[in-house]
Amino acid sequence: MTATRCSAAILARPRAAVTVTAVEIKAPGPGEVLVRMEACGLCHSDLFIAGLDKLPLAPLTLGHEGIGRVEAVGAGVSDWAEGDRAGITFLGTTCGVCDWCLTGRRRFCPDQANFGYTLQGALARYVVGPAAALVRVPEDVEASVAAPLCCAGWTAMGALREAGLQPGQSLALFGVGGLGHLALEIARVQGLRVSVVDVSEEKLELARSLGAEIALSGAETGRELQKEYGGMDAAIVFTGAPAAVPQAFRALKRNATLVLVGVSRNPYELPLAETVTRGIVIRGSYLGTHQDLEEAFRLLRAGAIHPHVHEHTLAETPALLEQMRRGSLAGRAVIAF
Ligand SMILES: [Zn+2]
Ligand SMILES: [Zn+2]
């Protein structure tokens, strides 16, 4: 590699507009790897980070859903070599010694680094990051199709596991964007009966084509799922819109599980009496386990899931993020390098 600079989608400072700017390509330091990116998906968390009042790192390259190939390794790196296929997720390094790290829950480590947040992200032609933070990616998957698995697919898989359903049980998904449409496909593979709720007719149409039994929009979707369809064994809220949470709650059967995935800085409100007397389980779900990510790649290779991706150039990133903010992107927008 002879280039010394490459384009990256960056935030120059907190709450700045995202711009595509030339940044310096660093040589990998000890324990680090230089990755030449093939593709990186755009995630709602990129928008969330772009809206924060404070950033741990600025200027910051966004992006945490990428696939590339190792171009060079730094001193002391023995488990990665030039040419290896590597995935970049939101989860970077963790401390390795806390209770969470030692019990298969690294993603909850209080001392974690995150790509596109505390580490420079993957929305750039070249990325330097800790070797320990990379994940293995199969050779026989197309980068732009597989990239969404590194965040959206992984998170969807983790949320479904947290929902704890058996084949034949009913599940409602609130929000059928990048995560929701993958969760729908995975849930169908698992033999679940899936309902979806979204405000976009285009997304509902996609959901129907992917096997959703019921696809609803409107202000009373929770009541509708409860009264007309008998209630749900679990609901997963992928949208960060707080109004979706009470609707999802309203849709639940007794002893059902409500899984919260989409983030925003707003509070949400739920009825205390019904939570208690109906024995509702409410849990937050963040990313997934290592096995969840491997399972997502396995399903892709087996042809069981088909991420709906639209390929774009890096220069389109600011406009695409704006479209995502308005909720008008169906499937996943992926930057192909
Ligand atoms: Zn993400
Ligand atoms: Zn830890």
Image (tube, rainbow, N blue to C red):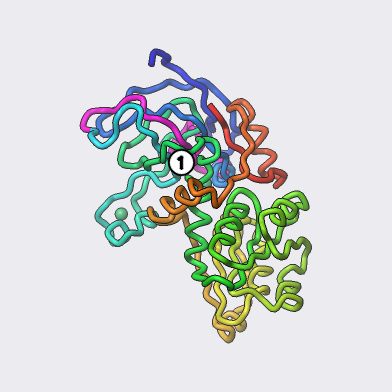
Q: Residue at x 55, y 63 (%)?
A: 260
Displayed quadrant of residue 245: bottom right
- Vertical side of 321 occupied by 8: above or below: above
In the displayed image of the protein, which residue is found farthest to the left? Answer: 76
Q: Is residue 52 covered in magenta?
A: yes
Q: Which residue is mark 1?
A: 117
In the displayed image of the protein, which residue is found farthest to the top? Answer: 2
Q: Nearer the viewer, residue 200 or 23?
A: 200
Q: Residue at x 54, y 66 (%)?
A: 259
What is the span of residues highlighted in magenta in the rendered image? 50-76
Left-right relation of 163 to 274: left
The x and y percentages for residue 315 are 61, 25
Amino acid type shown at disc 1 = Tyr
The x and y percentages for residue 42 are 57, 40
The x and y percentages for residue 253 are 62, 79
Q: Nearer the viewer, residue 220 or 184?
A: 184
